[in-house]
Amino acid sequence: MPADTTMTAGAATGAPEFQGPAAEAEGFWGFSRAQLAALGVMIVFLAVAPFFLYPVFLMKLLCFALFACAFNLLIGYVGLLSFGHAAYFGMGGYVAGHAAKVWGLSPELAIIAGAAAAALIGLPFGWLAIRRAGIYFAMITLALAQMVYFFCVQAPFTGGEDGIQAIPRGSLFGVVPLNSDMSMYWLVAGIFLAGFLLIHRIIHSPYGQVLKSIRENEPRAISLGYRTEDYKLMAFVLSATLAGVAGATKSLVFGIATLTDVHWSMSGEVVLMSLVGGLGTIFGPMVGAAVIVTMQNYLAEMGAWVTVIQGAIFVLCVMVFRRGLIGEIGNLLKVKL
Amino acid sequence: MTNGTGRRGLLAMAGAAGIGTGIGGRPWRSARAQAANTIRLGVITDMSGLYRDSVGPGSVALTQQAVQEFGNRGFQIEVLQADHQNRPDVGANLVRQWFDQGVDAVVDVPTSSVALAVNQIAREKNRIHLNSGAATSDLTGSQCSPNTVHWTYDTYMLAKSTAAAVVRQGGDSWFFITADYAFGHALERDTTAFVRGMGGRVLGTARTPFPGTTDFSAFLLQAQASRAKVLGFANASTDTVNCIKGAREFGLHRSMRLAALLMDVVAVRALGIEAGQGLLLTESFYWDLNDRTRALTARVRARNQDRPPAMVQAGCYGVTLHYLKTVAEMGIAAAKAGGVETVNRMKALPCDDDAFGAGYIRADGRKIHPGYLFQVKSPEESTSPWDVYKLVTTTPGDDAFRPLNEGGCALVRS
């Protein structure tokens, strides 16, 4: 299945429509006109939503959206299906939680510590995993992530099954207290937007063009003189780091970091989010995360049925709209989102 | 049906579903306004996992029983329920959302790891945490909170009663099989303190992953190899039942004494009286204890799947009734204003209910009532399916729990 998904990644983004640097130079910051419109809608949503929806729910949504965007950087633009992204998400959360609670760091430093930890794990893991492709790549990342999970069960600082509890939100830069949900929301929205724009910038940089060429045809990229392994490793570490930022932010929002976030099912969930939203689309992962998190939140009373419904949606996506929600909408409107 | 319209139709449906959930989410703000004359209780418990039978739907039923018996005294009472799946993050998020939506108090909260997480949130939001199901004595010790009442039992009380009885009967070397989370650790720690204090020794411990361990054979063989006289189970409910069944299959009950440190009637029924006979265990409630407990059982049985209440479920009844009485006494506006003031009033007001009799709540949030050491009856002694215990000793409330100044609770020193 993972090998198949990697292949659809190429197909979903529309392999023949590969856009050269010239095509992307138009518009602001590499955004096409349609993407700018979508970005505008997204920013308006971020600004208005907390006045209508429960802010903590929105923060959860944004953390997962950033996580899915980070994951999408790897699968959508390099064509690598990592099945171990929970390791970076979860460890980012644990390290940030520990930093904020035990070392007493302010939230921005705690998030940086979480991101650094995720990068440090991502470096050797990526170095090892990129030696293989397709299903072998997925299985290696899964195996390494399971080792991280086991470490988290046993290591004293994670608190095992109890998790790290009562993580203080603290004050941003030591000045702005984040205890109120609204001030925390603006921080989370800012982090998400920064991460989102960073990923967009990466994809549309010359470096990103090379990544896409590796996705389309790695032997050709090699023959053109690119050291593709270095490019892939760099993308892997970037993706892991951003996943770490998402995990770190989430643990500060909820004041708790637990095994749920390093469990392999979290790795599966982020695949699902990207797939539902649309692999290789800029806005897809965010929409996918919104759909999945909303379902988990509002269908929670149905208990075990949530996973059944999720599974049905997964099947539906793969069978009926393979480009994902955003991919299909983009296809209908004949624009690239 | 052409493929194109099918896809478009599905997209429209997905879009509609998205909008629907968006609208569904909105009433959380308006809920506050209408709630001025309503006390909202949220029963958060294990509805789907291994503790379900000891807590779960029974805890909800007994909470509703308390609400019904309290009657209408000028304000409405609403009971919500949720499943925390024994996961601290799920429990913490649910409770945070409840408090933000105007829930006044959460009830039950079994599974110590979840309870400790909920404890923090109740304090942060200045609401009320009425705990019946969690065992860890840290709730009224190192992590005590002015927003929390710990009603039914705790690990110190279980250890003091059961462990001391077993050591007195000659069981002076122990091996533990411990559920690897806050509850198991606390129960093992408190039991070890009593065993050592009485001159016994602890030869080893095996920590089992929680939740999710169903095969305990590797741990049981480890216990057998330790040559300890007593095998203590610092776990609960289904875990304990699986351990005891496994131990009997390996013949451990012939070479070692089995000590179930937390066991209730539901677990004994699940284990079977045949396998369980002779076990010593401690509870603070048993349905057949006296006339008042039998009367409560008769009243609630139909609502509770035709079962007598288990200890934690009875605790939900007791703590809810006491909370509602306090609300009536101080007035709903004052009671809704702040969690700390209401809990302080609960501590000032003497408690009395059919399940636990007379008692009181201490400064650290600990409810004080007697603890009972029971022995599981043999099949010949038992006259009905739920007739499973005979009373061995009763420890008065002031001796049953950890002395007030030994818990390290910051509320006591101040």
Image: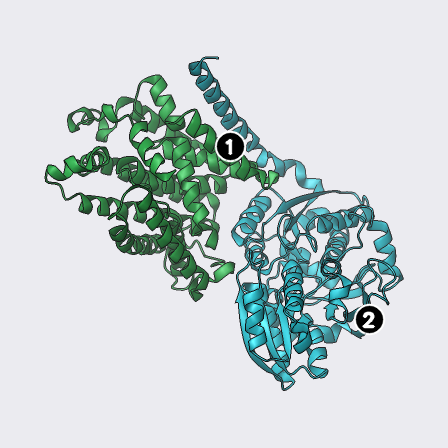
Chain colours: A green, B cyan
Residue B89: image location, x then y, percent: 52, 51
Label number found at residue B170? none
Residue A297: tell me if it is visible: no
Q: Crowding near pointer 1: few (<14 within 10 Å), some, many (20+)?
A: few
Q: Nearer the viewer, residue B232 or B337?
A: B232
Question: Looking at the picture, which amino acid does disc 1 mark?
Answer: Ala
Q: Nearer the viewer, residue B44 or B181?
A: B181
On the rendered structure, is B350 left or right of B130?
Answer: right
Q: Chain of mark 2?
A: B
Circle 2 — which element? strand
Quick one: which residue is furthest to the top in this view? B1
Q: Nearer the viewer, residue B103 or A202?
A: A202
Q: Crowding near pointer 2: few (<14 within 10 Å), some, many (20+)?
A: some
Q: Where, quadrant-wise, is the C terminus of chain B in this rendering?
A: bottom right
At 78% across and 55% down in the image, what residue appears?
B309
Report how far apart the C-alphas of labels 2 and 1 lie in the structure.
Answer: 53 Å
User: Is disc 2 in the same subunit as disc 1?
Assistant: no
Circle 1 — which element? helix
Instruction: Indicate whether A70 appears above or below A158.
Output: above
Q: Quadrant of residue B120?
A: bottom right
Question: Looking at the picture, which amino acid does disc 2 mark?
Answer: Leu
On the rendered structure, is A183 left or right of B271?
Answer: left
At 70% across and 61% down in the image, what residue appears?
B151
Residue B256: image location, x then y, percent: 66, 77
Label 2 sits on residue = B391
Q: Chain of mark 1?
A: A
Give the mark toward the camera: 2 or 1. 1
Label 1 sits on residue = A312
Residue A36: image location, x then y, percent: 29, 26
